[in-house]
Amino acid sequence: MIIDGRRSAAWGAALLLLSWSASGCKPRREPVLAKVGKLAITEPEFQRRLAEVTPEYQNYVLTPNGRRQFLDILIRQKMILSAATDAGMQKTPEFKAQMDRLKAEEAERVAEGRDYLVTQLWLSDLRRKGVLSVSEEEVRHYHQSHPNEVQVRHILLSTPEEAEVVLKMTRSGGNRFASIAQTKSLDADTAASGGKMSPAIYGEIIPELEDVVFRSKVGEIVGPVKSKFGYHILRKETEKPIAFPMAEERVRRVLEKAKLDEHLRSLQSRYHVEVLDAQFN
């Protein structure tokens, strides 16, 4: 999981403060680089903190002067922490309130990590049992049936009426599709690049668009096409064969996903799904 750097630093400091109040915990014997009052800076801590800085600065810290300068930064931080602790900041209502918030956020992250771990272990178990196994023959047959890769631009709109208006704009002459996508598309991930989507083989595009995209001609503008995201105007930029070695792993992922989807459909009757918020119906 990716954790915001500021939160991570704050949580690390909070854990440090909590460790002072823990009883019966003996510190591990680690090489100590410096001491600031009762606090120590160990070699493992130095390396952990160094890993948080930019690669360019890490290269500088490899030099003797850089290493000492970085240690001085850590010493200053420990001095600030010591002064703040001596001032009793850990006893204030603000500290306790923010610690409660940090604990709640950490509990959420642990729960998310647990869910991720359980999911990955289940998927690994399905692979071991052969439920998701994909043979070399299946991969090659799929590639032979779908040997091409396409490059597509799209414009995403919220209503069919808007989509019809934008479709006319794209067909009104001139190569305006990319510029219209930049100003009109609701897909923030692709709008900046003129609506350009990642190159895709069959199975990598959302199902509602896939057949339309692969049936259309290069340069053709089609739409509106409805999907769960909204209404799409599409323009196929290129279509060309992709060599098997370049496509093999992508095909394998497509086939594995299809087998997982099939397995989930077989389990669907066990788990009742009910959408309670009307805006999602």
Image: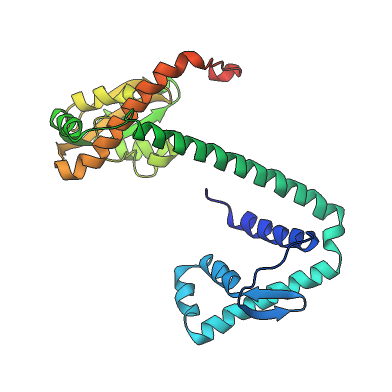
| Colouring rule applied to residues | rainbow
Viewer-closest of 33 and 162: 33
133 to 104, vertically: above or below: above
Return the residue found at the far top. 269
Comparing 56 with 23, the one in front is 23
Note whether residue 84 is visible.
yes
User: How many marks on residues?
Assistant: 0
Going 80% across and 72% down the picture, which residue do you hit? 83
Say if 125 sits above or below 18 in the image: above
Q: Residue at x 60, y 77 (%)?
A: 31
Quarter of the figure with residue 52: bottom right
Residue 134 x %, y %: 26, 32
Q: Position of residue 193 (x, y in %)?
A: 35, 44
Q: Position of residue 64 (x, y in %)?
A: 51, 86
Q: In the figure, is residue 15 to the left or right of 228?
A: right
Image quadrant where residue 258 sits: top left
189 or 265: nearer the eye?
265
- Horizontal arrangement in the rendering, residue 37 relative to residue 163 (left or right): right
Q: Is residue 175 visible?
A: no
Query: Viewed as shown, does residue 75 lie left or right of 232?
Result: right
Instruction: Kindly identify the residue that appears in the image at 86 percent across and 68 percent down.
Output: 87
Residue 80 versus residue 198 in the image, above or below: below
Q: Residue at x 39, y 30 (%)?
A: 156
Foreground residue among 231 and 14: 14
- Occupied quadrant, residue 121: top left
- In the displayed structure image, the side of residue 227 where residue 54 appears, left or right: right
Residue 263 place in picture, x, y as percent: 38, 22
